[in-house]
């Protein structure tokens, strides 16, 4: 039996003309919404890795991108 994968951060591009409807459907697909930008047609949130294909299939979702974390060394680091 396989375990469900842990949550990952995602940025979702949606049809801005149907924003509220798509957000409701994304939540039903398993997305925990952490931020909404209706004028830009995007939202951010977390979802189980194995639910990403379900989220991508939501009508009105144009793209799903995993969040990326960039770490920059401190200014006094020799790598600067």
Image: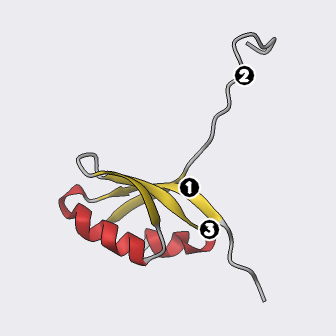
Look at the image and tell me whether residue 58 can be seen. no
Horizontal side, residue 8 vs residue 28: left or right: right
Spatial separation of the CA atoms under disc 2 and disc 3: 29 Å
Q: Earlier in the sequence, mark 3 or mark 1?
A: 1
Residue hosting label 1:
9
Residue hosting label 2:
73
Q: Would you say the residues marked 1 and 2 are in contact, meaning their CB atoms lie under 8 Å apart?
A: no
Quadrant of the frame with the N terminus: bottom right
Furthest toward the bottom, the residue is: 1
Residue hosting label 3:
49
**Mark in the foreground, 2 or 3:** 2
Relative height, residue 11 to residue 57 (above, below): above
Quadrant of the frame with the C terminus: top right
* Few, some or many residues within 10 Å of mark 2 (<14, 14–19, 20+): few
Spatial separation of the CA atoms under disc 3 and disc 1: 9 Å
Q: Residue at left 60%, top 44%?
A: 68
Closer-to-camera residue (22/75): 75
Per the image, label 3 sits on a secondary structure element best described as helix
Spatial separation of the CA atoms under disc 1 and disc 2: 23 Å
């Amino acid at each position: 039996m396989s375990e469900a994968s842990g949550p990952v951060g995602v940025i979702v591009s949606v049809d801005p003309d149907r924003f509220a409807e798509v957000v409701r459907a994304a939540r039903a697909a398993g997305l925990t919404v952490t931020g909404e930008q209706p004028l830009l047609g995007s939202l951010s949130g977390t979802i189980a890795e194995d639910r990403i294909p379900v989220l991508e299939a939501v009508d009105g979702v144009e793209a799903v991108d995993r969040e990326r974390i960039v770490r920059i060394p401190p200014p006094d680091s020799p790598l600067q």
